[in-house]
Amino acid sequence: MKSLKTIILILSCFLSITTLAKVAAKEVFKTNDIIWGLTFINENEILFTERGGKIKYHNFETKQTKDLLAPSVKARGQGGMLDIVYKKIGDKSYAYFTYSSEVKGAVVTTLARAQYSNAQLKKSEVLLETKIISDTTRHFGSRLLFKGNFLFMTVGDRGERKYAQDLSYHNGKILRLNFDGSAAKGNPFENKSGALKEIWSYGHRNPQGIGMNQKGDVFSCEFGPRGGDELNLVKPGLNYGWPVITYGKEYWGPSIGEEKKKGMEQPLVHWTPSISPSGMVVYEGNKYKDWQGDIFLAALGSEHLRRLKMDGNKVIAQESYLEELEERMRQIAISPAGELYLTTDSGKILKVVR
């Protein structure tokens, strides 16, 4: 009986390993710049951003690639062309995008949109130039997520920690906006004197991922300093603590703040050592039923695709895929058919295959 149990245990471990081994990636596109943002128009057509400053179109079927738009981008340090999301509004189609731009001598995270039609972008307009204090080129954020009639936008602390706690600036905040870039009605600080009305949550360091499940719960992932990367359930008006609380430390060793404090939110999960989570999605596609509701993170520093198995809003297990590729994973997107795609800092678009 004991030997039978041993055989079953070994077999189950083998099956688990082989299941993980089935997750692979196929290169479907290559360019020469960091692909920071990726969005699907349909199963064959995509828009993507190159951090150097361009928005491009690609058709997987015809292999056609073309430059569409090059906004006035300040591509320095971690800045440049950032996220992009395709959105139909009424009878019009738009590409919403973020980038770093110079405004009155400061480099800020900027939101814009352009009308999309037949592989062209027209009538580009700036919707929001964030109010920032910083002379650095770090921690811009910035990811976009549509939820119903609203647009969520993440903004990094820009390397100026204390302003993540200051509601009079956009540093270290997640914003909830109308489609025209104005502050959404009902935001938690709309009636607070001195506070910016766009703010939905605050106390973030550098949130580069945001996603939503079928229930409408919004999640965000962010970089810690040395350790202390986080996944958070984002709710209105809450303080996520940075830099007052963090599980990360200074790069040279000392602690930054406490790990817990009353009135400040704890992450759903945190990582030390860092995995450097960039883009993220909550998988709600039809292709892989066993992944339904799970969160996927593109990990930069640790160079892998990470799956967080979810039970409601709790992380109950984690798995890592594609480490053998040794690629800095930057963004994740789900196609209309439920296929999972990744972008890399080496300029590749990868299709996940099982």
Image (cartoon, rainbow, N blue to C red):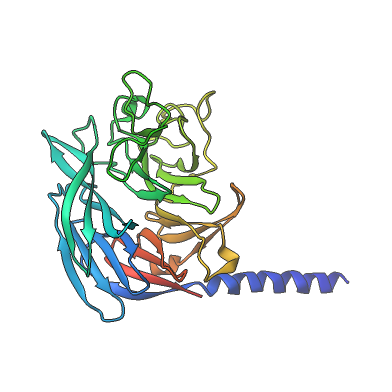
Query: Split into 4 quadrants, where in the image is the N terminus?
Result: bottom right
Name the spot of residue 214 as percent of width and height, x first. Answer: 54, 54
Residue at screen point 21% across, 65% down? 56
Total count of labels: 0
From the viewer's side, name the closer residue of 348 and 71.
71
Residue at screen point 65% across, 73% down? 15
Residue 70 in the image: above or below residue 196: below
Residue 185 in the image: above or below residue 180: above
Side (left or right) of 261 relative to 134 = right
Name the spot of residue 55 as percent of width and height, x first. Answer: 20, 60
Name the spot of residue 321 as percent of width and height, x first. Answer: 49, 65
Q: Residue furthest front?
A: 91
Residue 243 in the image: above or below residue 180: above
Q: Would you identify the image quadrant in which residue 155 lies?
A: top left
Name the spot of residue 312 as percent of width and height, x first. Answer: 61, 49
From the viewer's side, name the closer residue of 346 and 145.
145
Side (left or right) of 159 relative to 152 = left
